[in-house]
Structures are given as C-alpha cells and as structure tokens.
Amino acid sequence: MSGMLDSGTRLTAQNGEEIQIVDMLGAGGQGEVYRAKTPGGDKALKWYYPTCATPEQDAIVRELVDRDFDDDRFLWPEAYVPAYKGSFGYLMGLRPDHFKGLPALFRRQLRTTPRALLTACLYTVEAYQALHSRGIAYRDISWGNIFFDPDTGDVLVCDNDNAVVEGDVSGISGTMEFMAPELVRAEPGARPGTQSDLHSLAVLLFMFLMNHHPLKGKRELGIHCLDEAAERKLYGKSPLFVFDPADDSNEPDPMEHATVLATWSAAAGKLQDLFRRGFTVGLHDPAARVRESEWRDALRAVLDSVVECASCGRQNMTEPGENPPPRACWGCRTQLALPPRLVVTTPPPRAEHHIRLGRAARVQAHHLRPEPTRHDCSDASLVAELVEHPSKPGRFGIANRSQQTTWTGTRSDGTSQQIGPGQTVPLRSGLELDLGGGARAVVKAK
C-alpha cells in the first residue's frame, strides 16, 4: 500500500477508540482516506497531508466532532485522531458501494432515470438546508463531495471537514467552478457562507439535471488556455448563464453542447425559471439567489409530475398543476398523453400536492403534511400507489399501503366504501378519498 500510513498501523482516537489501518481507499487534495478497523466495525479515516494539517484545520475538525451532527445524509466527522508523524485525522462512516460519484454520471457510466435524478436533487437540497438551519456553512459544495444511488436517488454528503459556523473566516473558499462570483473576484468583505453556498448548490443542481456547467458556453470554446486567469473571468469577472434570456453571447454551441441543449429542453419550466433567476440576477445579487425552500417545493412538484411515455416508456418531466401545456417525449418525440392526477390536500396550514397517476405513481407520507421537514420517497414511507388489475390489463386502482389507516372513498355518484390497508379502490375521475388525519385527495381527469 502506497500512502502516509502503512497497513497495520495502530492509532488511538481522542475518544479512546483503538484503530488499525487496513488499506487506503483513495486520496484527494487535502489528504488520504483509509479503511480502519475499530471496536465498532470498519470505518473510514481521513488523514491530512502535513501541508494541510494546519492549526486552523485542526480546530475545524475538533469543533465539527464536538458538534455531533447526527444526520444519515452526511459522513460527519465522528472522532478526532490526534497527531502522528506530523499529521492528524478523523473517523467517519464508510461510503456504501451503491453510492456513486457524479463524474460517473457525467461520463454516462451510470444507468439512472429522471425520477431518480430529481429525487437526488430534492434530497441534496434538504441535506444542505439541514446544515444551514444549524448555522453551518458547507463552503465547498461541488460535484466531488456528493454521492448518490442511481436507482433510488438517495444521497450522501462527504468531505464535511470544511464546514464551519456561519461567519467563520478560516479554511477554504471552495472549488472555482462552484464558487460564488463575488468569492472568485475576491471582493472586499466577501466570505464563504450560506449565501455563497446557495450559488454552489444551484450549480450542482444544474449539473445533476443538465449534465453541464451553467456558465460554460461559447465563451469557453474561445479560450485557448483555461488557466486560472481565464477561469476567474469565466466564473467571477464576467459570468454569463448559457441560457441568459437577455444575452446569447454565451449560448451553447449546437455541436459541442448538444447534451445541455437537449436536457434543458426536456426540463420542466418551473425549474428553468429558478435556474434563470439564480444565474442572472443571482450572479450579481446574493440576496436574490434561490433559497433551499424554493428548490425543495419546485423539485417535489416536478417529481410528482413525471410521467412515462406510452410509446417508448421513457420518463418525462411535465409541468405541475392543472392543464399543463402539451409536450413531446424527449426520447421518441411522441406527444405525451397525460394520465389523471391526484390532488392531495393536507391538514392546516393547507397545501396541495398534484400527483400524476402514471404507472409508477406513489403517495408518500410527506404528501400528507403541509410542511414536511424531510421528504422520503422510499417504500418505508409509502402511503398509496397506483396498481394495475391482476386480470384486467389497463384497469387501475389506488392501493392503500398504509399500515393502520382505513380510508373512506366517495364516488362521484355519492356512494362510499371503506378501503383498509392492503385494499384497492378502482380509479375513477371524481373519486374522493379521506386519507385520515385531516388529509384528503380527489382524482382529477387532467
């Protein structure tokens, strides 16, 4: 094994845990990551290069460990490992193999779906919102620090050792491609924090969904040497959105940037509007950047509006709500036929969720809450789903997947029935459902 620490090296964490190095998992700009045996099972150990093992970084790691941030979306520093041979490190959980890095997504080495990508974006927004709500700025949001499950959209935030309490000036400013323009320009008084995180988050979401950087258009193609000075101009001094409605001088090149032209045209207008704001006025006015709550609401609404093309089966984003504009499938260009939608009304303070009842439609527990603190699209939070009749193809019903709640269903003719857990009610326009707890739903034709 080639690294700073040899296999078999024994260390002791500050909390008393005995550690034995197994092998090296990888290396980055700040240090190396090792697999380590501990009394609690195998964990990951990040070990800093001596040049990065500064007193400032030491203080940051100790503070993060003491904060004891318990969130399963983060590989948070769990235990500080004191100095050994001129450096130090910290223990964190191991990243499971099913979580993949974004570079593999950008190289099209992963099989995933629009629904999984939208879910990953929603979970990413909520993860950083949870961090910001505790007064912590991440400061280095980038494609290198987020991993996701291409099947489910579950996310895992790594490299959390650069997060600091809002307003702290120590540590790094970020990765150039993701840094807010005022930080790239090194404006007096500009410092990394939650406002600059919002810009980085918008860049990350754009890359997740569009497979392209929002500021890399024709201007980049004209740069012969993309050195630091050129990057500072591209991302800081003269940033321009590739789809800026008022200036097309940095628009995508039809040949070189065919992917982003296709992904942008396939994106829901609700998301396009937020990206336009974030990368036009938001480039110059930090206060105008898109907040996590805005991304969360838009992503959830678009996720609920994904439908499968009847001709080719590909998933398509459609516009949320009533009577959306007609749209062609991004894959086969066939006109999409929109299925009915289920309008779920939550208890007070009332909110509405519009769920397109395609073949994969599901109602989750978060749909029954007016302001869910965290969305969960897994089977564990499943409340209802659309199912096809086992002996009558093309006939569908809504199955009660709750554990204990019996629904009351009222048909358009006024007759009603009870739908217990595991039972199914036939899908009909005008069907009203009392889902319990003050939540109600109605099936709409379009």
Image (cartoon, grey):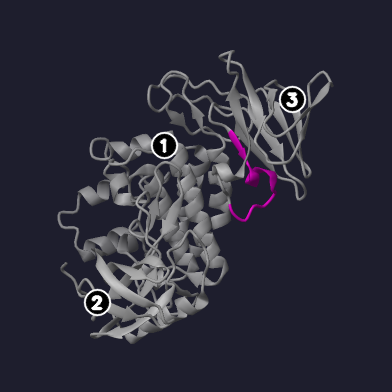
Q: What is the magenta range? A: 362-374
- CA gap between label 1 and label 2 equals 43 Å
Q: Give the residue number, with chain letter if any, for mark 2.
A: 9
Q: Give the residue number, with chain letter if any, for mark 3.
A: 431
Q: Is residue 32 visible?
A: no
Res. 62 image quadrant: bottom left
Q: Give the amino acid at mark 3.
A: Leu
Within-10-Å neighbours for mark 1: few <14, some 14–19, many 20+: some
- CA gap between label 3 and label 2 equals 66 Å
Is label 1 in contact with label 3 (beta carbons under 8 Å)?
A: no
Q: Give the amino acid at mark 1.
A: Thr
Asked whether, in this view, residue 311 is left or right of residue 258, the answer is right
In the image as oriented, which residue stretches furthest toward the front? 39
Q: Is residue 391 above or below residue 220?
A: above
The dot on residue 113 is: 1
Sequence-wise first label, 1 or 2: 2
User: Image point 15% across, 68% down: which residue?
Assistant: 2
